[in-house]
Structure formats: structure tokens, C-alpha cells
Amino acid sequence: MTDTVSADRSEPIWIALDFPGAVEAEQFLKRWPSDARPALKVGMQLFYAAGPRWVSQLVEAGYPVFLDLKLHDIPNTVAGAVGSLLGLGVRFTTLHTAGGRAMMEAAREAADRVPAENRPRLLAVTQLTSTDQACMNEEIGIPGTVRDSVIKLAGLAYRSGMDGVVCSGEEAGWIKTEVSGDLVTMVPGIRLKGDDAGDQRRVLTPQQAWQSGADHLVVGRSITRAEDPYAVYQLIREQRHKQGREG
């Protein structure tokens, strides 16, 4: 296995900019204090609408960016895609473990063409947090429990040289203890207490996810749809600091 480089854990909260375009995303960011530069997750919808140049502009403006494109194709194509992303300056990007070891290793080789401190950290998606047991067994055709599948795929990601995995909060602890504590765990499907889960199935609160072993949380609607997004963001950060003191 190619040695992984320790990913930056200094940004515990990544805000999912799940907006249809750059205009809406920029309007959201204008609601923040002028000197605030929260860590941002840009997913497929916004990336396809706004493009790579806009992502570069976010990075140039001082925002840490997690580019969540969930790459999944033949090894050569995914390696080419990773190569195209190297100049954007993003901290993280994603690909699917379902693409297999050869695909992940090709992605890592492409990422390693730049110095380690400059390359994006590669996160492998295990099972989407919208996938439940029935969907995985009956629709996708994967037998066994979601837990077993996640552990197996996380192990494959680790052996393939990935820096971390995307998993639900409840699975982060299992991965840390059963696969490797070196794997960074990026956890979506986060909701504050009382928030609607929406299309997510395996959800936790921030406190529950951190207690389980999450390194990073992706928080979307609980912040982006709040009356005061910055206040909610600060509240979650305070909870993280409290968790760190008590842990």
C-alpha cells in the first residue's frame, strides 16, 4: 500500500454548498462576516453549474474547499480526472470504492504527481448515507449488513492508498478500530437535533458523530437553511471544542 499523508484535521466542519449555481452560493456567503472563511464542500450540482474556475476563485479567496465529485469510472479515466483537478488547490476530493483497487490506485498515482503538501487528499466513498439495508440488499444487490459492507470497502480503500473515507457517523468508529486509525473519516448526513433528515437514512447529530470517531463533518441544510447560518456554524464549532475538552 502507498503510504498515506496525514490529512489536515484542523477544519472539523465543512459546509455543503448545495446550491444550483454560483450566484446563489455567493449570496449565501455574503451573509457571513467579511473576514470569515469557513471550509466549504462543493458537490456535483454546483461544480457542474459554476465550473472549475469558480472553485479556484474560492480557494484564492481563502476558503478551504472539499470538492465532492464521487469519481467512478475505468482507472485511466479517473486518473485523468484527478490530474485535471490538481491545479484547483482543493483540500479533498472523492471517488467511489466501488470502482475497485486499480481505479483507486490510479487516482492516487495521479494525485502524487504534485508535492504531497499540495495534492488533494483522496477520500473513498463507502456506502452513501442515503442507502439503507433494504436498498443495499434488494436494489443494489449487495448481501450482508451495511456495517459489513462499509468495513470491507474501507479496508479496500486503505489498501489502495486512500487518505480517508466518506461514511456515516455511526460507522466512523468501526473504521477507526477495525481498519485503521490513520484513515480520515469525513461524515455527511449530519443534522442538528430536531432537523428533518430529508433524503438521508443514516444520520447523527454533530456530538454523536464526533463521539463515534468522525474527523470531519459535512453540514448542509442545518446551516444553509438557518435564519442565521453563521450563528449555527459557531454553535457547532463550540460543541466541537467542548467535545475535545471532554474527550
Image: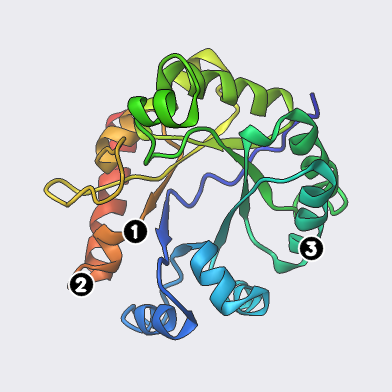
Spatial CA distance of label 1 from label 2 is 13 Å
Q: Could you tell me residue 192's position as x and y percent? A: 20, 49
Disc 3 crowd rating (10 Å Cα; few below 14, some 14-19, many 20+) is: few
Q: Which comes sooner in the sequence, label 3 or label 1? A: 3
Of labels 1 and 2, the one closer to you: 1
Residue 89's disc is: none
Q: Categorize mark 2 by other alpha carbons within 10 Å: few (<14), some (14-19), many (20+).
A: few
Residue at 62% of width from left, 52% of height from top? 93
Residue closest to the eye, 91 or 156: 156
How dense is the environment of label 1, judged by Cα within 10 Å: few (below 14), some, or many (20 and up)?
Answer: many
- Can you identify the residue that label 2 sits on? 228
Q: Of the residues shown, which amino acid type is indicated by label 1? A: Gly
Query: Can I make out residue 1 in this image?
Result: yes
In-front residue for pair 224/230: 224
Q: Position of residue 181 (x, y in %)?
A: 55, 23
Comes first in the chain, label 1 or label 2: 1
Query: Relative to the observer, which residue lies in front, 93 or 245?
Result: 93
Residue depicted at x 68% and y 35%: 162
**Left or right: 189 in relation to 104:** left
| Residue occupied by mark 3 | 84
Q: Position of residue 16 (x, y in %)?
A: 41, 60
